[in-house]
């Protein structure tokens, strides 16, 4: 019964109660998940989770894995890597069948992977980038006011945490390489929020979904930051599969994702990562990212 | 110094208390100093350990300019929150080789990229010290009045110097901890004092009490105060005990001597009086005999007018009274006499009986006498009668009189006691002198005569008063020769 322990971050009381009731239901169903004898040799699928999500909530990931194994009847291995780059490399090397990656790497890997599902956040497969500053800084009104400061990026392969802010600077007619006095990567959106909240950086770029999820579970952290600029909406980081994966398995996993919200345990797991469901998605969702990449000559 | 004139009762406990206080303070101070030094040493050891680990792990992130990784490494020191633990640094920061802040755990105070040289006092001084290469493993910087201690460690591998790690320890945390230690020390000290001071006071009192008592007694002995009954003597055999014994012995000797001197003086006085009175008596007796004889002759011759005869009668009676008095002064114990027998004692008892009966007194008579005692009967009878008459007169009606006669120490002891008020001391001193009387109408020769007889017989007489009884004791030595 690790469901409760999986709650690594505090949840406001009402939400927690609702959540706990769902967990209780999930717990009732849990015994069904125990694999039958003789299934040890069944096929194993490897899924990569990246810092685009809650990749440092290990108990939650363990619950995801158990749930997926139960639903898919497959052995599931979850691979965690601290940067998008490593995840991408593993996909390239076919060390991984599926991955939950950011939209920016998705476009990088377009020839290698197929779009399988896109999470629906607040009913939409969309998210954006927030430019945040320490709450103590009451003056800054946008990126333009952060010139010459120390700025925290999330990951060099993150759209909202790297591509968008550089694109916005580029559009202002400035050179993103010299606009800030110093920049550094935290390799995670959550840590961008921490770096800005601590005042280590005077500004940072963060995934709106991560910031808002943190705002629910750790409001004391987000309250130390202030959003000064919001990007246009982009396609949400998608679930992708390696193109070489057999279509039957692709279909099975895709069906699993698309119907996850329909059973109580799946819905509870989605709720824990603050998502509504998975949708089929459309590669055109990511056209905006492609545009920005083109601006830097990457697409 | 008034202190040195104080009684030992206060001086000993005060000296002891002072010494105890001094030792406790000295020990506490030494312990506190040691604790403070230990704390400083603990901080140094902790800083050295932490600095060693951090400089090693920081080298690679700094070389790759991975600021966040560097921050996470230094900030991991505060994993579990910042505590008020003096051996946990208050702040950690890294400065670049040119003295700019690379990363710090307190960005508000030390923002990234800030030039340490341009920051406030302590930092600028530290920055100047860091401009020169650090000799040894680390540099300890403790600005005199500042509340912080800095430990700086070079971050380098081979000769690549990528920055300097600075650990900042707060003395604000350091001092309360030390104060806690000091308070603890003070508490223990107070506890020790609470135990030792009363013990010391008790011991001091115990030591001083016999000394004070001895001093008081000696003072009394010197100033001739009234003798008092011996109080609890010091029971131990140490020097003080020996002093007490010597003092008691000396006092006893002095008392004996004084008593002897007093007795001697009294005896000498009584002897002188005796010589004087018997001399006068002899001188008076001769002319007196002549005068009486002349009167007798005149009366026998007759033919005197009536009023002359009357006058002569008066003269004769007067002279006879003088003769009686003089005769009484001229005590003659060793006249020709037979030895004392029990019959003599019975005679005295019979003689005194009417007087005793008259006053309804009770007479307890105990006499143990061998058949014959070598003592003159007349003298003994007179002694006994005199003492008994005295007793009867001094005792109230229905009072009790006691007589005890028995041989003792090669002599005879005669004791007469009676219920009466005690004899005042000033009278006691002159009790056996002639013409000293306690009663109206007494001529005061009874005890004088008794004394003279007893002395002539070579014995002694003593008077004593105790418990509402006056007691005369006579001891007479038995004579060598048979009478």
Image (cartoon, coloured by chain):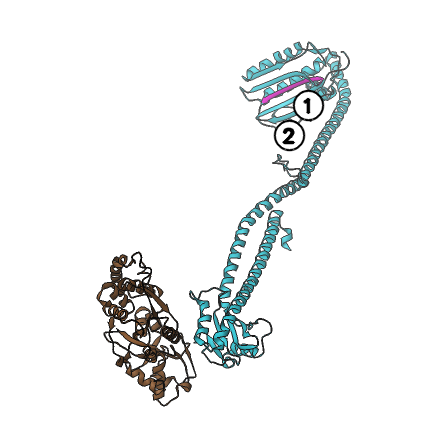
Chain colours: A brown, B cyan
Residue B119 as seen in the image, left or right of residue B134: left
Residue B227 as seen in the image, left or right of residue B156: right
Residue beneath the point at 61% across and 30% down: B424
The C terminus of chain B lies in quadrant: top right
Chain holding disc 1 = B
In front: B333, or B277? B333
Q: Which mark is residue B427?
A: 2
Q: Quarter of the image holding residue A61?
A: bottom left
Chain holding disc 2 = B
Q: Which residues are magenta?
A: B409-418
Give SS at disc 2: helix
Rendering coords of residue A101 (x, y %) = 33, 74
* Whether residue A105 is situated above or below residue B310 in the rendered picture: below
Rendering coords of residue A238 (x, y %) = 29, 75
To which residue does mark 1 refer?
B461
The stretch drawn in magenta includes residue B413: yes
């Amino acid at each position: 019964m690790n469901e409760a322990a999986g709650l690594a971050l505090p949840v406001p009381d009402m939400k927690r109660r609702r959540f706990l009731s769902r967990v209780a239901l999930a717990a009732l169903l849990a015994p069904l998940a125990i694999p039958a004898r003789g299934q040890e040799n069944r096929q194993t699928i490897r899924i990569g989770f990246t810092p685009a999500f809650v990749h440092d909530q290990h108990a939650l990931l363990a619950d995801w894995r158990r749930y997926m194994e139960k639903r898919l009847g497959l052995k599931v291995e979850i691979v965690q890597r601290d940067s998008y780059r490593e995840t991408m490399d593993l996909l390239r090397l076919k060390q991984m069948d599926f991955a939950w990656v950011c939209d920016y790497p998705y476009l990088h890997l377009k020839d290698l992977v197929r779009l399988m599902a896109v999470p629906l956040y607040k009913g939409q497969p969309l998210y954006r980038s927030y430019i945040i500053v320490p709450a103590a800084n009451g003056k800054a009104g946008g990126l333009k006011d952060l010139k010459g400061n120390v700025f925290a990026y999330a990951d060099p392969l993150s759209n909202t945490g790297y591509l968008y802010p550089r694109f916005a600077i580029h559009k202002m007619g400035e050179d993103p390489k010299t606009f800030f006095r110093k920049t550094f990567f935290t390799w995670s959106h959550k840590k961008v929020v921490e770096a800005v909240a601590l005042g280590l950086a005077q500004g940072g770029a963060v995934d709106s979904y991560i910031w808002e999820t943190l705002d629910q579970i750790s409001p004391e952290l987000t309250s130390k930051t202030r959003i000064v600029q919001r990007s246009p909406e982009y396609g949400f980081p998608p679930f992708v599969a390696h193109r070489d994966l057999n279509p039957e398995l692709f279909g099975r996993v895709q069906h699993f994702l698309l119907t996850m919200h329909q059973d109580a345990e799946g819905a509870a797991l989605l709720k824990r990562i603050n998502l509504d469901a998975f949708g089929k998605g459309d590669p055109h969702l990511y056209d905006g990212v492609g545009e920005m990449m083109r601006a830097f000559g990457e697409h | 110094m008034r202190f040195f004139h104080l009684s030992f009762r206060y001086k000993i406990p005060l000296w002891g208390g002072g010494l105890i206080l001094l030792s406790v303070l000295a020990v506490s101070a030494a312990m506190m100093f040691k604790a403070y030094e230990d704390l400083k040493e603990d901080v140094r050891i902790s800083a050295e350990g932490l600095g060693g680990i951090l400089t090693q792990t920081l080298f690679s992130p700094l070389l790759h300019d991975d600021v966040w990784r560097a921050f996470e490494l230094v900030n991991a020191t505060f994993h579990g929150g910042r505590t008020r633990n003096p051996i946990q640094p208050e702040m950690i920061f890294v400065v670049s080789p040119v003295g700019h802040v690379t990363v710090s755990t307190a960005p508000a105070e030390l923002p990234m990229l800030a030039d340490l040289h341009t920051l406030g006092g302590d930092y600028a001084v530290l920055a100047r010290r860091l401009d020169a290469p650090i000799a040894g493993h680390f540099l300890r910087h403790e600005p005199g009045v500042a509340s912080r201690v800095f430990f700086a460690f070079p971050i380098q591998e081979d000769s690549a110097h990528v920055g300097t790690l600075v650990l900042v320890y707060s003395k604000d945390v350091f001092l309360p901890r030390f104060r806690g230690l000091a308070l603890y020390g003070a508490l223990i000290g107070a506890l020790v004092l609470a135990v030792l001071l009363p013990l010391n006071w008790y011991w001091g009192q115990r030591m001083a009490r016999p000394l004070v008592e001895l001093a008081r007694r000696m003072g009394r002995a010197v100033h001739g105060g009234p003798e008092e009954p011996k109080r609890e003597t010091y029971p131990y055999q140490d020097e003080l005990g020996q002093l007490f014994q010597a003092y008691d012995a000396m006092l006893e000797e002095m008392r004996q001597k004084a008593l002897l001197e007093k007795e001697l003086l009294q005896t000498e006085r009584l002897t002188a009086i005796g010589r004087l009175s018997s001399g006068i008596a002899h001188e008076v007796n001769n002319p007196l005999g002549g005068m009486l004889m002349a009167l007798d002759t005149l009366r026998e011759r007759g033919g005197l007018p009536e009023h002359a005869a009357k006058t002569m009668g008066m003269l004769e009676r007067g002279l006879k009274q003088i003769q009686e008095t003089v005769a009484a002064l001229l005590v003659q114990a060793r006249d020709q006499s037979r030895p004392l027998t029990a019959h003599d004692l019975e005679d005295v008892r019979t003689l005194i009986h009417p007087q005793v009966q008259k006053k309804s007194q009770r007479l307890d008579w105990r006499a143990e006498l061998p058949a014959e005692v070598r003592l003159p009967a007349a003298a003994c009878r007179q002694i006994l009668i005199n003492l008994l008459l005295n007793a009867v007169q001094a005792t109230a009606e229905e009072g009790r009189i006691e007589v005890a006669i028995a041989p003792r120490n090669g002599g005879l002891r005669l004791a007469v006691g009676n219920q009466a008020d005690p004899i005042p001391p000033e009278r006691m001193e002159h009790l056996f002198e002639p013409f000293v009387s306690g009663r109206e109408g007494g001529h005061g020769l009874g005890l004088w005569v008794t004394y003279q007889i007893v002395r002539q017989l070579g014995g002694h007489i003593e008077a004593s008063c105790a418990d509402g009884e006056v007691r005369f004791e006579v001891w007479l030595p038995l004579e060598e020769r048979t009478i």
